[in-house]
Amino acid sequence: MTERRILFAVRDGDFAAWKAAFRQASPQLALVKQPESGIRYALVWRSPSELYPTLPDLAVIFSLGAGIERLLHDPAVPRTAAIVKMAEPGMTASMTQYILWQVIRHHRRFWELEAAQEEAHWLDQDYPAPWNRKVGVLGLGTLGSAAAATLRDFGFATRGWSRSRKAIDGVACFAGDAERDAFLDGLEILVCLLPLTPQTTGILNADLFARLAPGAALVNAARGAHLNEADLLSALGSGRLAAAALDVTGVEPLPAEHPFWHHPRIFITPHNAADIDPATAAAEIARQVARFEAGQQLEHEVERDRGY
Ligand code: NDP
Ligand code: OXD
C-alpha cells in the first residue's frame, strides 16, 4: 500500500500524540492537520460542518467516538462517504471498567456506606450473592456485549437487549420491541449502552422504570437524551428507583445549578466513562484502511437508515 493521508479533524485533539500513534501503527499512514486535495480518510470528532466541502474525495470518515448521531444530523456530511464507529480495545476496556464499578457500587449499595461514614455510623448492611442480583444491559453492541460478558464473569444474573438476536454464553439475550418488557421485568440494576436514535430517545422514562424491581438502580453511560430527567427525579423521590449513575446528561457540561449535582442518590461523572487509547485506535484504523483498500467490507460501519 502506498502512503495514505488521514486528516485529523478532532476538536481539542492532541495532534502530536495521535501522529505518533499512527506512525507506530503503520508506516503507510500519515496523519495530517490541514485539508489537502485527494484526502480520502478523516478522523473526526465534533468537527465543523464547513470542513466537509473542502474534502471532495472523502471516502471514509472514522469517528473518534462510538456515538455518531451528530454526524448523521449534519447535512454537510457527504452521504457518499462511509462512516465508521470507533471500536477499539482501549475504549471497550475503560467502558467495561466503568460499568462494572457502577454495578458493584449499586449491588453493594456502597453509597449507603459513604453516607454512613459521613455520620460515623457503623452501618450493618446485607446484600445478596451476585447470582441473585438481576442486572440488564440495554444494547449488546461493541460496548454492551463486553460489559454483559464481564458482569456475567463477576457472577451477576445478566440479561441483555438488542435489536437483532444475540447469543452470549451465560447471558439471557432478548431481542426487539416484542421482548423488551420481558427483558426489563424485575431488573434490579439497569445499564444503558444504546446508540441515540429516534427509537431510543427518551427510552429511560417512567414507563420503563415501572417495569424494574422497586428500588432498582440505573446506570446511563450512553447519551443524556436517552433519559427523561424529570421522570428520573420523580422515580428517585418516590423510591421507585433507589439510585442512578449518569456519565452523560442532556446538557454537557452539566450546568452548576442542575438538581442532579446535589442529589444524594445521583452519582455524576463528566462523560468520561470510556477513553480512547490512541495507540490501539490508530492500529484499528490502520487495519480498517487496509481492508478498505483491499476492497473488503469495513467493520463497524454506520447504517445511516438505521441511525447507528
Ligand atoms: P453499537 O452500535 O456497537 O451497539 C449498539 C447496540 O444497541 C446494538 O446491540 C444494537 O442492536 C442495539 N440497539 C440499537 N437500537 C436498538 C433498538 N431500537 N432496540 C434494541 N436495541 C437496539 O454501539 P457501541 O456499543 O459501540 O456504543 C453504544 C453507545 O455508547 C454509543 O452509541 C454511545 O452513545 C455510547 N458511548 C458512550 C461513551 C461514554 O464515554 N459515555 C463512549 C462510547 C460510547 P443490534 O446489535 O441488533 O444492532
Ligand atoms: C463516544 C463518546 O461516543 O465518547 O465515543 O461518547
Image: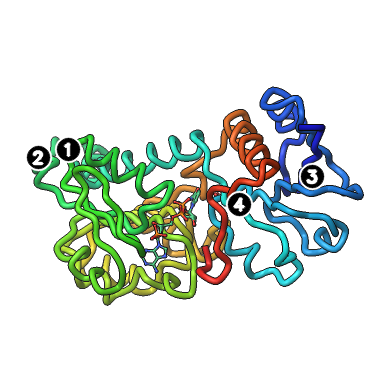
Indicate which disc, 1 or 2, sits on the residue closer to the N terminus.
2
Q: CA distance from mark 2 to mark 4?
A: 40 Å
Q: CA distance from mark 3 to mark 4?
A: 15 Å
- According to the picture, the residue beneath numbered tag 1 turns out to be 155
- Nearest the viewer among 122 and 232 is 232
Task: Please rate how many residues cluster around mark 3, counting C-alpha atoms within 10 Å: few if below 14, some from 14 to 19, many from 20.
Answer: many
Does residue 265 show up? no
176 left or right, relative to 21: left
Kind of residue at disc 2: Ala
- According to the picture, the residue beneath numbered tag 3 turns out to be 7
Image quadrant for the N terminus? top right
Disc 2 secondary structure class: loop
Kind of residue at disc 4: Val
115 left or right, relative to 28: left
- According to the picture, the residue beneath numbered tag 2 turns out to be 129
Q: Position of residue 107 (x, y in %)?
A: 20, 45
Q: Nearer the viewer, mark 3 or mark 2?
A: 3
Task: Please rate how many residues cluster around mark 1, counting C-alpha atoms within 10 Å: few if below 14, some from 14 to 19, many from 20.
Answer: some
Q: Is mark 1 within 8 Å of ligand 1?
A: no
26 left or right, relative to 54: left
